[in-house]
Every structure is written in structure tokens, then in C-alpha cells.
Amino acid sequence: MEIEKIFKNLILIDFGVLILIVISSLYQPQEITNMSDALNDGLLSNFEDISRIISLVLFFLYLITLNLLYRFIYYGKPLYLFLIISGLLLNYLSGSVVYSSFSGLLDQVGGIISGAILILLYYSPIKNNF
């Protein structure tokens, strides 16, 4: 089926964008880092260790979930929705963020791809494969 191929390609592209986001955050310009340090902290600023642990757990769960979705395993669908909502909530509680132009672009592309995957998961014939 053609829609399954599109769905799987979106998952692979999402994985690639995620890897690019990680790489771009490692090589962030010093000016961006300085501006980020000067911003107001979010609600989770008092719990930096817990926030980092939650972020790492969500990151690795996201990688596992992409694999589950790629193989059409049934519990990947609700887990993906949970991770998207959890990530949005974590971003909201973390406070302001400054991006470089490349990181901002990757963030927006990642959001678009996640939205496309969610639409395909819940409103296309793909939902019958789970």
C-alpha cells in the first residue's frame, strides 16, 4: 500500500530530524548559550536533575516508539500520543528557549512531521494496521 510507505518514510525522516536536533544542540554557538542562560527559568528550573532525567527517558522512549510504529505494533500508537503530549508539557514547563536558525528550523520540521504521523495514525487507513 502506498500510504504505508508514506507512513514509514515519515517515521524514518522523523528519526533523522531527531538525530540532527541532537547534533545541532551539541554544536550550539556560544552566543545562543549565553542568551539561554540569561533568560527567565521555567517552573522546572528548581528541579534540573529530575527534568534532565525525564527528558532522557522521554527521548529514549520516543526512539523505541518510532520503532514500534514502524513495525505496526499496537501499543506504539497510544504511547506515541502520550510522548508527544508529555514532550509539549515538558517544553512548556521548562521556560523560554533560544534557538539558532538551524535548530529552530529542525524544531519546526520535527513538529510538522509529528503532526503528520499523528494524523495518519488516527485519521487514515493506517489506524487499521494497529
Image (spheres, helix red, strand yellow):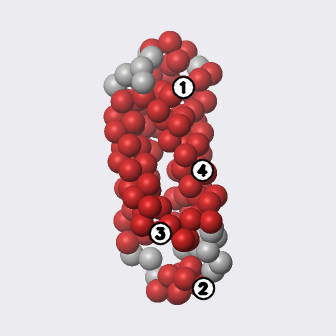
At horizontal 56% and vertical 55% (from top left) the residue drawn is 90
Please tell me which of labels 3 and 1 falls first in the chain. Answer: 3
C-alpha separation, residue under disc 2 versus residue under disc 4: 23 Å
C-alpha separation, residue under disc 2 versus residue under disc 3: 16 Å
Left or right of 89, for residue 25: left
Q: Are marks 3 and 1 in contact (CB under 8 Å)?
A: no
At horizontal 62% and vertical 60% (from top left) the residue drawn is 93
C-alpha separation, residue under disc 3 versus residue under disc 1: 34 Å
Q: Please identify the quarter of the rendering in which residue 36 is found.
A: bottom right
C-alpha separation, residue under disc 3 versus residue under disc 4: 17 Å
| Numbered circle sitting on residue 81 | none
Q: Position of residue 82 (x, y in %)?
A: 53, 37
Q: Position of residue 84 (x, y in %)?
A: 54, 43
Residue type at mark 4: give it: Leu
Q: Quadrant of the C terminus?
A: top left
Please determine whether, in this image, residue 29 is positioned above or below residue 83.
Answer: below
Read off the residue under disc 1: 121
Read off the residue under disc 2: 38
C-alpha separation, residue under disc 4 versus residue under disc 1: 18 Å
Read off the residue under disc 3: 48
Residue type at mark 2: give it: Ala
Label 4, residues with CA under 10 Å away: few <14, some 14-19, many ≥20: few
Where disc 2 sits, the SS reads helix
Q: Which of labels 2 and 1 is toward the front? A: 2
Residue type at mark 1: give it: Leu
Read off the residue under disc 4: 88
Q: Are marks 2 and 4 in contact (CB under 8 Å)?
A: no
Q: Observer-nearest residue: 90 or 35?
A: 90
Please determine whether, in this image, residue 32 is positioned above or below residue 86.
Answer: below
